[in-house]
Image (spheres, coloured by chain):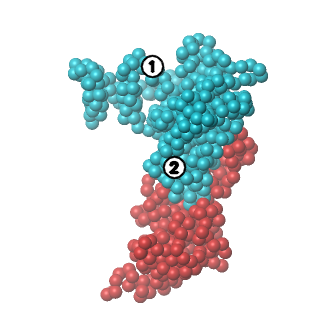
Amino acid sequence: MHLLEFRNISMHFGGIKAIEDLDMRVKENQIMSIIGPNGAGKTTIFNCITGLTRPVKGSIFFSDVNIVNLQPHEIARLGIARTFQNIRLFKEMSVIDNIIVAQHCRTSSGIIDAVLILRKFRLEERIIREKAMEYLEFVGLYDFANTMSGSLPYGAQRKLEIARALASEPSLILLDEPTAGMNPQETVQVMELIEKIKKLGKTVLLIEHDMKVVMGISEWIVVMDHGVKIAEGIPEDIKNNKLVIEAYLGKEY
Amino acid sequence: MSLLKPLIISIWFALLFLPFKGLKAALFFLIILLLTLLLFNSLFRYKNIFKDPLQKIFNLFEFNILTPLYESIYLRYVLFAALLVIPFFVKDYVLDVAILSCIYIILALGLNVVVGFAGLLNLGFVAFYAIGAYTYALLNTKLGIGFWSALPFSMLLTTIAGFLLAIPALRLRGDYLAIVTLGFGEIVRLILNNWDTLTKGPNGISGISTPVVFSFTFYKLTHFYYLLLFFVAITIFITKRVHKSRIGRAWIAIREDEIAASTIGINTTMYKLYAFAFGAFWAGLAGSIFAAKMQFVSPESFTFMESVLILCMVILGGSGSISGVIVGAFLLVLLPELLREVQLYRMLALGAGLVILMIFRPRGILGGKSASLRI
């Protein structure tokens, strides 16, 4: 079954065609990668899915709901979460608060509950705190719970962003270059983490430049170049695809 | 390096005093200030030497020095008791200053919701204060409604005004938002100044009655002091609860990173609206009390400088920190009073003091702490 489906999506910025007539499908509980040279439109795809930019044409179906005209927070509520290429944590909040705030759309206590400290509020606070600790344990940041998230080392910040995305309880999680700037050990840890996320029954859509990661964990790969999908398939096919090699290395090769 | 900062500061201030007191005094001032700053600097360096033995002594009394003093529960009890008995020992003048501080504390806590929590610069906050004050003034003088019946109505109206301002303003951010809110503040003041038939224009409205509780009329300063103490306590309690709840966290997330906040499911537009309305709510309360206490309102009390003053309280105390904002509001009411002695140099000294503070504690007196959300 397809969890996410792109139909004729086009996105233009002025005269630049960032995405042109893209059709794409993401199967449920699959790790799928989008690769391509710089400026191929990969991050724009993510922005379209999460509602940060609105495509000029086409529709995106997420479990049979057209999400093109929805607001980012509505899309998050439906079950899509993402991380960013340039880390966007809430830097002045502690690590655990970053996770707690991410459970926003799964909680419902209002101003009256909070002011009167009603039982519902106390219960909810306790549950989201416990859950937050679980998510931190999941990504291996349990010991950093009370650290200020801005002062975490770089690799840990990336993991925290993944944990924050998980905390909003999505069924589809979009990771934008999760291993960028990491050393080989950290990269391996993140690969294991992504496999673990899949085991939770979630679908992972990945943008990645590190071919070891892409070929190592993807079950399906989509290759973009200049806003157009030039190939898709299982990793072995992509490795030997002429168009892909051309896009990455130029015609002579 | 540690020498450079005090040196620059003292030269800067000496130059500030030069036109008023002449070269000799300026030089004298320079040397005194430099020595003081250096002394503080060197003491600061050795603070760790004192910390350990002090800690041992305090441990004997189970009193933790490392948790800042203002957080300690003992200090709170002492402070609270002191606040309750103050009226029995002081002159009316002191009480008057205390009442004024309380009104500003409520205002600053309200603005802190908008500026400190949600990170939206609001330069027209005084507009809500004015709306609150005039609503009570008009309800009371035209319709004869008492303080307690008019209060909910005037707070509701201010909250609605907060919503109304926020709707057009939320498409903007940063500097542009600040300009729009500034414009709103001026519009409200101009309306009050020119709508002669309703507000009596610059003459203001007088003869507003004071609150009545069970046929007991508030007329002495002491009564107003306790009334304000009560409302300040309520304000602190509610803003603190909301700050530590789901709503407060959403505000802070928006302040930290609006895009990330929207992708984790926070309706950023709605929550910014809430912030404006919730902040305005407290301004409505402060305004009504102000009108009831002064028994007179005029547009003169609600100028742009008031907005700036309230904003200063928030920034100076530590934007986002509730205890910081209280300290900031208190200081900015108290300092000008203390500096009455030096008359001519009052504003100069105040400005200089603020500059020093911002150099040494750029995030406010009690700022620099993040919103920790322990329950």
Residue type at tag 1: Leu
| Nearer the observer, B39 or B20 | B20
Give the alpha-carbon distance from disc 2 to disc 1, as whole Å: 36 Å
Residue for badge 1? B338
Q: Position of residue B153 (x, y in %)?
A: 70, 38
Position of the N terminus of chain B by quadrant: top left
Mark 2, residue position: B255
Shown colour of chain A = red
Where is B139 relative to B95, above or below?
A: below
Q: Colour of chain B?
A: cyan
Instruction: State the SS at label 2.
Output: helix
In this rendering, the label closer to the viewer, 2 or 1: 1
The amino acid type, in three-letter code, at marker 2 is: Arg
Residue drawn 34% across and 83% down?
A: A250
**For marks 2 and 1 on the same chain, the one whose residue lies earlier in the sequence:** 2
A77 to the left or right of A234 = right
Residue at coordinates 57% horizontally, 14% vertically from top-left?
B92
In this picture, is A28 found above or below A162? below
Quarter of the image with the C terminus of chain B is top right
In the drawing, does residue B60 fall left or right of residue B216? left
The chain letter under disc 1 is B
Q: Residue at x 36, y 28 (%)?
A: B352
Q: Is residue B107 among what the camera can see?
A: no
Instruction: Provide the chain ID for the residue under circle 2.
Output: B
> Where residue B229 appears, x then y in whole percent?
63, 25
The spot of residue A3 in percent (x, y) is 63, 74
Q: Residues within 10 Å of mark 2 (few under 14, many from 20)?
A: many
Compare residues B352 and A232 and report the one nearer the observer. Answer: B352
